[in-house]
Amino acid sequence: MPEPIRVVVTGAAGQIAYSLLYSIAKGDVFGKDQPIILVLLDIPPMLPVLDGVVMELQDCALPLLREVIPTDKVEVGFKDLDAAILVGSMPRKEGMERKDLLKANVAIFKTQGAALDKYAKKTVKVLVVGNPANTNCLIASKSAPSIPKENFSCLTVAMRCGVSSDKVKNVIIWGNHSSTQYPDVHHAKVNLHGSETPAYDAVKDETWLRGDFISTVQQRGAAVIKARKLSSAMSAAKAICDHMRDIWFGTKEGEFISMGVYAAGNSYGIPEDLIYSFPVEIKNKAVENLFVRRRSPKRQPSQDGRGARRGSGGGDTDGCGLLRNPRTTTGSRPETARTVERMSLHVCNWPLVWVEVFLNR
């Protein structure tokens, strides 16, 4: 059996972590033969709650869980980490302006980024969950200059086909972790009766895919809060597990997923100093951006959701119509790239200048 890996979960006394920790500890994320040292980090007032969480984990008698360490100290929480799942953040409260929320989260993620830089392994994989996730991920990565920016990612969010979600693949989420994200099924495939079918052909309802489907995904978080008076917990924990497992073990051949990753070198015209959700493949625990090349004229997303003309671009594509290695591609950018560029000012709605101002204080 391999040596234990060290994993921290911040905000560990919260409801998302409560739904997440058991799955990590029993091997759903890092593998059924991977022992784990689980570090639970939260603020000092939450330490009594963490003691209760520790007791529950101990009572589960999970064979892979070698040690549980509750702490409020970053020098303990971030020491020799293999993986960091940053769940805790300052929630937006009634009457709070965005700049006030951003200022509070800059302080949190600047501290945690600096701690990662000082105490964690340089190979640590960092997943940021706390909202605004894209901005918080950027802050953490900028505060940890010795850790490759490619090691940082943030979370992004079944189709109406009469099949389970595991029969659907290659759905893309573009942009920001907010109501301005753009769900895109133009390259999605649905397994119907053992045969892969394009999502548009499987659903047979283009009006729904271009309307209610997009708005439902964009507003899902708000709908959950309205219904249960609390934000998502179980679904967020499941998404965290899936995201980190994909980083650890890679994506399946011929499949890609969406992650908020550092935008440097992208071929879509997105400003490079951002964390932005792109379609990616994971190989050897490394993120590889893919380049969406082909779309039908009627299915090209634009900032307002209407169609745009199809374009063409150079380079070698795979069976999904995706251009690999965009940093080495030559030729004109396809219409898709220009469309995503138009979307970027709308989707990335946290002014970068605020981040720079607060980081430099």
Image (tube, rainbow, N blue to C red):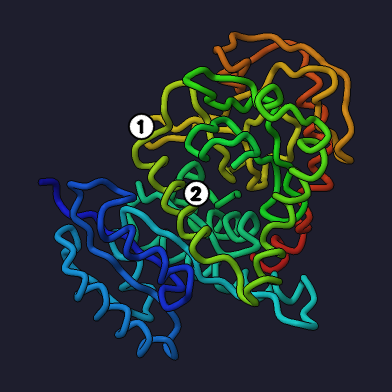
Residue type at the position of mark 2: Phe
Q: Which residue is mark 2?
A: 152
Q: Residue at x 43, y 60 (%)?
A: 85
Judged from the image, the secondary structure of the residue bearing numbered disc 1 is loop
Single out the residue that lies furthest toward the left: 1
Quarter occupied by the C terminus = bottom right
Q: Which residue is mark 1?
A: 284
Label drawn at residue 296: none
Judged from the image, the secondary structure of the residue bearing numbered disc 2 is strand
Residue closer to the observer: 7 or 361:
7
Quarter holding residue 320: top right
Give the left or right position of residue 244, taking residue 236 as reference.
left
Residue type at the position of mark 1: Asn
Q: Residue at x 51, y 17 (%)?
A: 195
Badge 2: few (under 14), some or many (20 or more) residues near its Cα, within 10 Å?
A: many
Quarter holding residue 39: bottom left
Q: Are marks 2 and 1 in contact (CB under 8 Å)?
A: no
Using the numbered discs, state the Cα–Cα distance from disc 2 to disc 1 in whole angstroms.
15 Å
Q: Which tag, 2 or 1, sits closer to the chain's start?
A: 2
Give the left or right position of residue 227, taking residue 27 as reference.
right
